[in-house]
Every structure is written in C-alpha cells, then in structure tokens.
Amino acid sequence: MKPFLVFSAIPVSLIALFYGVESSPAREWKDVSGRTVSADFVALEGDGVRVKLATGKETVLKKDVLADGEWAVAQDLANKTERNAAGADHALPVLLARTVATERNESTNWQTYWGSYDKTIDNKRVVEVSVRSSSDTDRTVVVEALWLADDGHGNVRGVMGVIRKELVLAARATQKVRVPMVYSSRDLKLAALGLRFVSGSSFGGWIMRISDPVEKKVIVQQGSRPPLLSWSDKVPVVGN
C-alpha cells in the first residue's frame, strides 16, 4: 500500500498509524483530512481512542484529529463493550415456577340440623421456584412470592401477601425454593334468616419474581397466569 500524504497539522502518532497498513480489521477510521485506516476498537482512553492494527500493535487516535462523527462512533462502541462486559457477569437467570401441592382443610365451628353452620376453610398452596444461573460468577438475588387474592367470583382484588427469601445463586447452577401460602376464609350460614356470609381470602393466583437487592429492580418474573403480572408493579422491590 502506498503511504498517505503527510500534513504538518497531523500529530506524529497519527501519521504513523495512517502509514503502511496492510490489512482490514473491524473498522475504517477517518481523520480530518479524509485519510482512513482499518483498526479494531479497544477502548476510550482520555481524549483519544485506543485501537488495534492488523499487525497487533495498539495506538491512540486523538479526538481532535478524528473526522466529524468518529468520536461519537467510538463512544457508542465503548458503551456496547461495557454492556457486553456487564452482561457476561450478570446474565439473566432462568426462572421456572409451578404449583406442586394443594390442600384444603375445613373445620366446622358449629352446625344445626336445620342447615345453619359456621365453618373455617384453609386452602394451602405450595409453589416450587427453580432458578438457573446463566452467569459465570456467583450472585445474590431475592426470590419474591406475591400471592394474590380474589373476591370469590374470579376477580383479583389485590396482593394478599409477599414472601421474600435471599438466595446466593451459584455460577451456572440450579437452585430450588418452595414457597407455601395459606388462604383462610369463613363461611357462615343462618338458614332460618336466609342469610349467608363468606369472608376472608380466596386464591387468586401468584407471581414469582427474582430481584436484585442492590439495584432494587426485578430481573425476571413469572405469573400463574400472564395477565396477573400487571400486579407486580404495585409491589416495590426491597433492597439491602
């Protein structure tokens, strides 16, 4: 390749860079005079861009000799490099939650032969949460179980309870946690008066989520039914 013309306004380090390059790595970098050189982006370094030539040599392109738009490209590449590095350490875990047990217990407080009664009903549910790490490093997360209650007619009325458990998620490992919840209700019937009262809470679904206690944000979540996930926004993440 023929050498580029040299102008005194160009620093010696940049002149050397734009001279004698024989291969074409990742990107063509352009200076204020329109000359180009092929080099891989390495990092931002002060007021310059460190790049790597095809020969393996690294050098710094000064910001003030780069063509318009080149510095913005360098900043974008730096941001992408930073995000990729963060992603390698904080890759999203895989969450799988499922109901593994249900149990109903009914006890009668009193009852008459003409049909009146007072009953207490407990419905227990257990959800197993399986979390698989996608990261090469250990990470502390919080498993959060949001239990929803309905109005007895299939309409969710709100979050009845939240159970939190801190978990040290080992690199590339899978860990399981079981989360129980009991829904209690009372069924009172006064047959002579033609009245019946049902109070307490009924199962309306669940949301299991993995959160970051430092950044105070939800990493991944799953609902027993997808529409229920809208209720997750109503419960803030609790940090350390």
Image: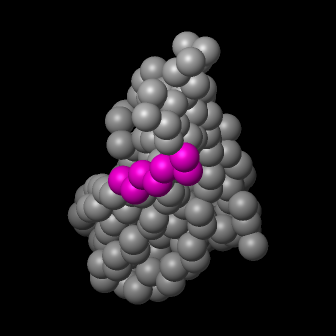
Question: Quarter-wise, where is residue 239 in the image?
Answer: bottom right
Point 70% across, 49% down: residue: 236
For this rendering, which residue is in front, 239 or 22? 239
Write down the region rendered in magenta: 104-110
150 with respect to 125 (left or right): right
98 vs 118, nearest the viewer: 118
User: Residue 153, position in %: x, y?
Assistant: 46, 21
Classify the position of the N terminus by image quarter.
bottom left
Above or below 68: residue 38: below
Q: What secondary structure is the stretch in magenta mostly built from?
A: strand
Number of residue marks = 0
Camera-side residue of 183 and 119: 119
Residue 233 to residue 29: above or below: above
Q: Is residue 56 above or below residue 83?
A: below
The residue most toward the front is 113
| Horizontal and vertical percent position of residue 80 | 49, 55
Q: Could you say where residue 108 lies in the image, as x and y percent from the top left?
A: 48, 50
Q: Give the percent coordinates (x, y) of residue 181.
A: 49, 59
Compared across the picture, whether 68 is left or right of 104 comes to right
Q: Residue at x 55, y 60 (%)?
A: 144
* Quadrant of the drawing holding the C terminus: bottom right
